[in-house]
């Protein structure tokens, strides 16, 4: 915050334990936006060589552990401190999602919504630690539904069943 001179800092990590640690600080008014994705999209993503490649079973275990920890956050934190936004809604229902986030954070995000609507990139500020955005320094929202075409019917059903409690909690359908 002292470097960026901003009132809000975004930690886009996927580490729930970092959120728990940040939440212990009395200097931080922590609000968590939990961006969840369909497990089948996550499994497909981890199958790419873009990031650390994982086999489907490893991806499923990872997804279940992260989502279990996230569900614990939802049970332990006040509702005013955490919101769940589905990746698919953020990308396909941008207006509604950004308005929900704006209301949750009590911040005007109309400029961000305009950037998204115009397909413009969003500039990334200072980055403290290794992050997938370091290279490009910009974010562009794009819907990735490759898994719908790439994964066969039986794999889609199997992956859904193996992550069933979280798929139901996050309102994903077969």
Image (cartoon, rainbow, N blue to C red):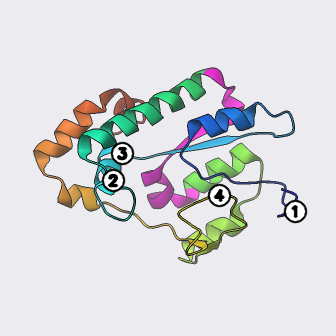
Q: Residue at x 65, y 41 (%)?
A: 32
Inter-mark Cα distance, 2 to 1: 35 Å
Q: Is residue 30 above or below residue 1?
A: above
Q: What is the magenta segment's predominant secondary structure?
A: helix
Q: Nearer the viewer, mark 2 or mark 1?
A: 2
Return the mark for residue 46.
Answer: 2
Q: Which residue is mark 3?
A: 38
* Mark toward the start of the polypeptide (3 vs 2): 3
* Mark toward the start of the polypeptide (2 vs 4): 2
**Extent of the magenta region:** 76-95
* Mark toward the start of the polypeptide (4 vs 1): 1
Return the mark for residue 5.
Answer: 1
Q: Position of residue 162 (x, y in %)?
A: 25, 31
Where, quadrant-wise, is the N terminus in this rendering? bottom right
Q: Nearer the viewer, mark 3 or mark 2?
A: 2
- Where on the picture, by quarter, is residue 114? bottom right
Return the mark for residue 129.
Answer: 4
Q: Is residue 66 left or right of residue 125?
A: left
Q: Tell me the element at label 3.
A: loop
Inter-mark Cα distance, 3 to 2: 13 Å
* Mark toward the start of the polypeptide (3 vs 1): 1
Inter-mark Cα distance, 4 to 1: 18 Å
């Amino acid at each position: 915050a002292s470097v960026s001179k901003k009132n809000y800092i975004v930690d886009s990590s996927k580490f729930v334990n970092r959120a728990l640690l940040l939440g212990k600080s009395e200097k931080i008014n922590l609000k968590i936006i939990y961006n969840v994705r369909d497990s089948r999209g996550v499994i497909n993503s981890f199958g790419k060589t873009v990031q650390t490649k994982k086999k489907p079973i490893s991806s499923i275990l990872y997804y279940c552990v992260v989502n279990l920890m996230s569900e614990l956050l939802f049970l332990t934190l006040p509702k005013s401190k955490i919101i769940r936004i589905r990746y698919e809604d953020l990308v396909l229902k941008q207006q509604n999602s950004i308005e929900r986030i704006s209301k949750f954070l009590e911040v005007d995000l109309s400029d961000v919504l305009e950037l998204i609507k115009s397909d413009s990139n969003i500039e990334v500020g200072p980055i403290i630690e290794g992050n997938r955005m370091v290279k490009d320094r910009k974010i562009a929202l794009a819907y990735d539904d490759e898994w719908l075409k790439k994964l066969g019917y039986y794999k889609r059903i199997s992956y859904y069943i193996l992550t069933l409690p979280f798929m139901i909690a996050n309102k994903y359908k077969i």
